[in-house]
Structures are given as structure tokens and as C-alpha cells.
Image: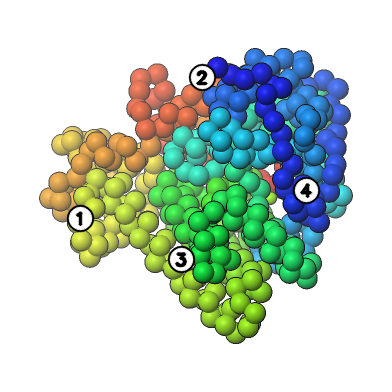
Amino acid sequence: MSAAAPSTVTFESRFATELAEMAIPWKAEEVPDPRLLVLNEPLAAELGFDPEFLRSPEGLPLLIGNEVPDGATPVAQAYSGHQFGGFSPRLGDGRALLLGEIADVGGRLRDIHLKGSGRTPFARGGDGFAVVGPMLREYVVSEAMHALGIPTTRSLAVVATARSVQRETELPGAVLTRIASSHLRVGSFQYARVAGDIELLRRLADHAIARHYPDAAEADNPYLALFEAVISAQASLVAKWMLVGFIHGVMNTDNMAISGETIDYGPCAFMDAFDPATVYSSIDENGRYAYANQPVVAEWNLTRLAEALLPLFDDDEERAVALAQESLGAFRRQYSAAWLAGMKAKLGLDSSIADDVASPLIDELLGLLQEGRVDYTSFFRRLGTAARGQGEPIRTIFPEPDAFLAWAERWRALNPDADMMDRVNPAYVPRNHLVEEALDAATNGDLGPLRLLLEAVTDPYNERPGVERYAEAAPETFGPYRTFCGT
Ligand code: AMP
Ligand code: MG
């Protein structure tokens, strides 16, 4: 495949034109001295861009919205959202813009979006900017998620703006160029619903169906089919998060995508020691978005989506509520099935092994991991070694291994498949201490550690020499860890 010249990439403005009530045409802030920090070359090629062009002085302004391509109408998108349970009718892109949509080389429509591009009419008290550390954090974590096989928005580039942005201290500013299959959120539907405009709500739902779930259009009740498709996508997504130990950190309804992609990497983190109550976000004081709460919150958010869609389900409200409730019931079943199948795979167990054999074994193991505060990622990877008959590396993880050894004997009797385990248990995830190290260095001008980290986490299942330290648990001296949001 030869990379196309920029002029052959055609921008569309479907959201801006089809949903004009939810789009405010706006311009990105001029950046006089942009400097490319990181460019995702494989993704650029997938989108049909020539990476060399994007790196050039002519291409760089495109990445930050300072050059608006033909056909593009940059807009700030309107949406509402429940933030930590409280409803805000008017959030929207306060510091972000949708540049437009493009068809990638596979013909899929992708959003090109900017984060940190200046204040918009939705900025409220915010300055509209973003800083280097958190934008690189989104880049690393989203690309790691993609490599792990988890649906996610992608990161095309981070560009430093040479502007200093006031946070707790002055920090270097940056713009992230984000790629998504769309930026439709649960909060987008809440916005259309509170606007009280059923025709707008229907147009938004039709737009979502066309873009993400075209089969729903053929169903008897297309809007209920749309809702059910979102339920399935979220059940599958959140199960994947749980299996890999990912904590989103700020699962507000404005941060839940209709596509089923992970979106909005703020205070997210991968769990180090296994503990269901783990919370890293500094603003999540009550643990609403703790690791173990994520499926419950996803279901809560989907209930908010149902409320927004009700008038489309049926003209009779009682009937609409009954339909919504029936559909919502599928979430738990689908989530549990996906999680259990994934856990069996993590343990190398054949899918034919009965649930009432596998489930108690899994529950007991998770109890042992919690008691021993065992590092989640390296445990499962090392368990693969144990499945190959080398028990020593895993035994030393537990200070008092007797209970674990008894568990392992029962597990080994089920003939775990070590190769299968290595395909689903990553060796490398963006561990908190490594992310901090890389972002600190990058904020001080050294991109070396970031490049090494990216190299490790974008090929997570292939354990290899040279990157050993990226597979190891955080040193005892690291922590307690805190992440920060919206910076
Ligand atoms: P988030 O926590 O990133 O999902 O953002 C929640 C809301 O706050 C969205 O409406 C954002 O656009 C807005 N927001 C976050 N940071 C800023 C900022 N620095 N300036 C303006 N708006 C912001
Ligand atoms: Mg958000």
C-alpha cells in the first residue's frame, strides 16, 4: 500500500451537517511554534496520510487544526452528562474540536478530533488547553489498549504548542489528535433528550445506527435494536477492561461511547496489586469508579441512555419502559458470560470446562491474589510458566504459598494450555510507575523513556529480551499512586 498524498484524503462533515443543533462551528487556537512530539505512523498510513507529510511544516498545522482542509467544518460538539452521578445538561467540547470524518483505507469512517485546541463556547471556567503529560498519557494508554485488542479511540499525534499552561504549576501545552469511530456518547443522547426535540433525538439515533450498527435499521424496532447493540458492546468492553486490570477512572455518561470504544483517558490506570476496591483517581473520593464497580456503573450509564431513548422505543411510555427494562436485563448476562469466558482463557482452561467447576476456582484465586496483594499482570503471565511445569517463579510471589499450591494442584489437573495463556495474558501494560517516569522525562524534554515504553506496550503479548523491566511489578517504594483528571 502506498501512502496517499494529503490532498487525496477527503474530509467530510457529516456530524456538523446532519446534527447542526449539536455542533458549533469553531476554530482551533493558532499555535505559532508547533513541535511534533510523537506521530503514530502505522495509524497515519491506515488513515491514508503520508506520515512524512504530517511531519513536515505543511502537514503539522493540519494535525492541530491550524490548517482546515477542504470539506472540513471544525465544530465543538454539544453533549450533556452525569458526572459522578450529578446531571449537567450542557457540557460539550470545552477544549476540543471535531475536525471532521474521513474514510480510512479500509473504507471505515473515522473522526479526526483535537483535544487541547483552545476555549470553545462550552469551556465554562476552563482555559481550553491541555498539557504535554496528560496528552502523552492518553497516547500511550490508548495505543496500549489497542495493542491489547481492546476497542478504543486511537492517538495519531501529540504536538507541543510552546505555550505554558497554568495548572498547579506552569506546564508545557500540547494538542492531541484523536481518532475515533465516532464521538457519539451516552451524553449526546441525553443532550438531544433534554433539548425536548424528538425529531433531533431520532436524527441522532439514525446517525448512530448508520455509523455503528447498520443492522439495527432492519429490526422491527430499530431504536431498541440500537440500544441493545450498545448494551452488548459495553458488556464486552467492560469485561475486557476487568480482565486486563484497567480502571477507567471517570466513567461519567459523557465519557461512554456509543461505539463501544474506550474513550477519554483522564485519570485511568492499570491496577498493580489486585484489589477490587482500587481507585487511583484523586477526584473519585467515594470510589464510585473503583475497579470492581465498573460493570455496575456501565449498567447505570446504560439506564441513563435508555431514559434518553424512551420516546423512540414506543409512543406509550409504560410500554417503552417495559421494553427498556427487558433489554437492560441482557447486560448482566452478557457481561458475566464475557468475563467468565475471558477468565477461563486467562487460566488456560478449555471453554468446555463447566462453569460450576471454573467459577469457584476463579473466585478462590482472586481471593488469594487480594490477600497477598499480588501484582495482577505479572501473576497471570507467570502462571503460564507454571502451566509449562516450572512452578518456582510463581510460588515465590506468595509469602505463604500453601493455599496457592493447593489451588494450583486443582488448576493443573484441568490441563491448562500455556500457549493460550500467553496469547491473552499480557507481559507488558503501561504500568503506573513506568508511565510516570516516561511522562516526567517527556515534560522535561527527554522523549527517550516514552519511546521505549511505547515499544514495549504496543507489542504486549510477545515477551522478549531487552524490555524485561517493563514486565516487572512496581518497586516497593512506589506509591500510593494518584492520578489526576481533566488536565
Ligand atoms: P473530561 O473530564 O475530560 O471528560 O471533561 C469534562 C468536561 O470538562 C468536558 O465538557 C470538557 O470539555 C471540559 N473540560 C475539561 N478540561 C477543560 C479545560 N481545560 N478547558 C475547558 N473545558 C475543559
Ligand atoms: Mg470527557
Instruction: Compute the Cα span from label 2 to label 3.
Output: 41 Å
For disc 2, the marked residue is 1
Give the amino acid type for the residue marked by disc 2 in the picture.
Met
Q: Are marks 2 and 3 in contact (CB under 8 Å)?
A: no
Residue 42 in picture, x, y percent from top left: 54, 24
Give the amino acid type for the residue marked by disc 1 in the picture.
Ser
The crowd level at tag 3 (other Cα within 10 Å; few <14, some 14-19, many 20+) is: many
Left or right of 377: which side holds 159? right
Residue 76 in picture, x, y percent from top left: 79, 46
Q: Is mark 1 within 8 Å of ligand 2?
A: no
For disc 4, the marked residue is 17
Q: In the image shown, does 334 or 218 lie closer to the viewer?
A: 218
Residue 223 in picture, x, y percent from top left: 58, 66
Give the amino acid type for the residue marked by disc 4 in the picture.
Thr
Could you tell me which secondary element the residue under label 3 belongs to?
helix
The crowd level at tag 4 (other Cα within 10 Å; few <14, some 14-19, many 20+) is: few
Instruction: Choose top left, top right, bottom left or bottom right for residue 26.
Output: top right
Count of numbered circles in the view: 4
Left or right of 482: which side holds 327? left
Q: In the image shown, does 157 or 228 lie closer to the viewer?
A: 228
Tag shown at residue 112 = none
At horizontal 69% and vertical 31% (from top left) the residue drawn is: 10
Could you tell me which secondary element the residue under label 2 belongs to?
loop
Tell which tag, 2 or 3, sits nearer the viewer.
2
Tag shown at residue 352 = 1
N-terminal label among 1 and 2: 2
Instruction: Compute the Cα span from label 4 to label 1.
Output: 50 Å
N-terminal label among 4 and 1: 4
Tag shown at residue 331 = 3
Instruction: Choose top left, top right, bottom left or bottom right for residue 368.
Output: bottom left
